[in-house]
Amino acid sequence: MQFGLFGSAQAKRGGPNDDSGAGFREFVERNIEAEALGYYSTFLVEHHFTGFGQVSATLNLLTWIGARTKTLRLGTAVMVLPWHNPVLLAEQIATLDLLSDGRVDAGVGKGYRLSEFDGFRIPIEEADDRFEECLEVMIKALASDAPWSHQGTYWQFDEIVVEPPSAQRPHPPFWMGAGSPASIKQVADRGMNMLLGQFDSLEKISEEVALYKSEVESHGRVYDAMNVAVARSINIVDTASEYEQALESRMAGRRRTQQLARRPNFQDTREDAEAGTLYGTPEEVAAKLQALQDIGVEYVLLNSPGGLPTLRRFAREVMPEFLTDSPKL
């Protein structure tokens, strides 16, 4: 298996005496140490207008991390394409890929939080069409060495060439989030890698991986388990009371996300909160990882509420049992 990081940095709001960037700097240092501990990648979210200090300029932060690391792959999970100019986004991705010697994983998505679409004054009803057009333009922009044009619904470009060229050709790997059979089939149809969310249960992950594998093979391509990344929240604890405290924090975080996302199928139960977690003692976490590996999962992205102490313990006490040589994506 391979292990990466997944999540966000937090900036503090306050007066002139508050160090608002401390959380971002701590996040950078966390990634630097994670590379030294053997973690393979880091994937950052993109969110806006929450008031929680989440990452909004994802590629900027990844550039800073990329400059301080040597091997850590730099992923987005995900850039919400309907909000972006596709040519400017392609230029930024290509620049980061070039400077990092080909370490970018371009995770993209359609977006789902109504408050963010409202904040950008973009109707959420346009999300699908905007995503499709933006992705088409980005792929053309990254892969083309000759001038090209595009006349679409939302974007028009005449005889342009995007610079610089990316290090990975024809472009960095594209990853796409999926959570339904229809979206999984879309990811496979496009030839993209797949990101699966941290709230999905083991049973659902098993079904999603099997469907993606089947769809990839139906297109005549060879399935690679490293083309599927599963996000999990991790918390290594030693006592029952620590476990309960971690789970309460998990449930509170899920409720906060629900207030922003307003998903109609949200289930606020203990069982649902536990479903996507690697919580417990090192032995219990290892058993949960083994269950994931048994259903075909080989790439896990860890969101660590406990920060570096948890990542250190995982790297020292759990990871060696599962770690394999880093593959070439």
Image (cartoon, helix red, strand yellow):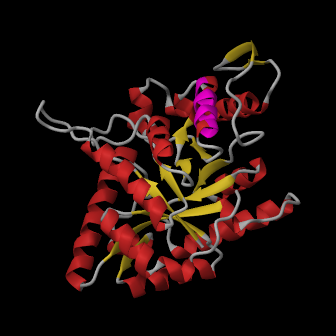
Residue 6, above or below 94: below
Marks counted in the figure total 0
**Which percent across, then down, holds residue 203?**
56, 75
Foreground: 104 or 182? 104
Give the side of residue 54 with respect to residue 325, left or right. Answer: left
User: Measuring 77% from the left and 33% from the top, which residue is drawn there?
Assistant: 143
Give the side of residue 325 with respect to residue 64, left or right. Answer: right
Q: Is residue 235 magenta?
A: no
User: Measuring 71% from the left and 63% from the top, which residue is drawn there?
Assistant: 212
Which quadrant is the N terminus positioned in? bottom right
Foreground: 277 or 318? 318
Q: Is residue 36 visible?
A: yes
**Which percent across, then down, holds residue 127?**
57, 34
**Which percent across, then down, holds residue 53?**
29, 40
Q: Is residue 112 visible?
A: no
Question: Which region of the structure is painted magenta?
Answer: 88-98
Foreground: 194 or 10? 10
* Residue 96 lies in quadrant: top right
* Residue 11 lies in quadrant: top left
* Residue 129 lies in quadrant: top right
**Which percent across, then down, holds residue 187?**
70, 52
Q: Is residue 89 magenta?
A: yes
Predominant secondary structure in magenta? Answer: helix
Q: Residue furthest top?
A: 158
Foreground: 308 or 153? 308
User: Measuring 65% from the left and 75% from the top, which residue is drawn there?
Assistant: 296
Give the side of residue 303 with respect to residue 225, left or right. Answer: left
User: Measuring 64% from the left and 33% from the top, which residue is drawn there?
Assistant: 94
Residue 152, above or below 118: above
Which quadrant is the C terminus positioned in? bottom right
